[in-house]
Image (tube, rainbow, N blue to C red):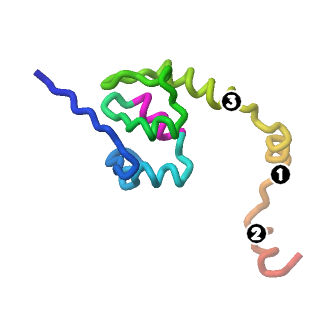
Amino acid sequence: MSATILRTLTVKSKLKFGKYKDYTVEHLFGMRKNLDLISIYFNLSNITFVDDILDELGITSEFRIEKPCKDNDMYKVFILEKYGKKQAPNKTLQKMSATTKAYRSDYLTRLNHGHK
């Protein structure tokens, strides 16, 4: 018989996994990493948050899932509903990067030394 351990994270809880393992949930809110916290909630089966944090993230009762489980489809629906469609890339920036030419290192060295 295997027991599933469910971790309920509070504001002061450290994540202890992934690239934010030394950070608390409060630090992630301060760094505006809400999308990462939302991803953790929907995509990791053994991690959940207290109701206050779920409300802060905007996860209403219709999007809350029964843990321990994960729901990638619900995550995609939630992101589309809350944040809308992905923005199209800025075409003027793409044109600028295409027209900007790379200078040779000797030319840049001369400019650095004050020669034209």
State which quarter of the image contains the C terminus. Answer: bottom right
The quadrant in which residue 51 appears is top left
* Amino acid type indicated by mark 2: Asp
The residue shown at (22%, 32%) is: 5
Q: Secondary structure at mark 3?
A: loop
**Residue highlighted by disc 1:** 100
* Amino acid type indicated by mark 1: Thr
95 relative to 70 in the view: left or right? right
Callout in the foreground (3, 1): 3
Q: Are marks 2 and 3 in contact (CB under 8 Å)?
A: no
Q: Which residues are magenta?
A: 35-43
Residue 86 - label: 3
Q: Main secondary structure of the magenta part?
A: helix
Q: CA distance from mark 2 to mark 1?
A: 18 Å
Place of residue 53 in the rendered image (x, y in percent of width and height, measured from the top left): 45, 40
Q: Secondary structure at mark 2?
A: helix
Magenta highlight on residue 37: yes
The residue shown at (81%, 44%) is: 93
Place of residue 16 in the rendered image (x, y in percent of width and height, measured from the top left): 32, 48
Q: CA distance from mark 2 to mark 3?
A: 42 Å
**Residue highlighted by disc 2:** 106
Q: CA distance from mark 3 to mark 1?
A: 27 Å
Magenta highlight on residue 54: no
* Amino acid type indicated by mark 3: Lys
Number of numbered discs: 3
Farthest-out residue, bottom: 114
Upstream in sequence: badge 2 or badge 1:
1
Q: Residues within 10 Å of mark 3 (few under 14, many from 20)?
A: few
Place of residue 87 in the rendered image (x, y in percent of width and height, measured from the top left): 73, 32
Q: Secondary structure at mark 1?
A: loop
The residue shown at (44%, 40%) is: 52
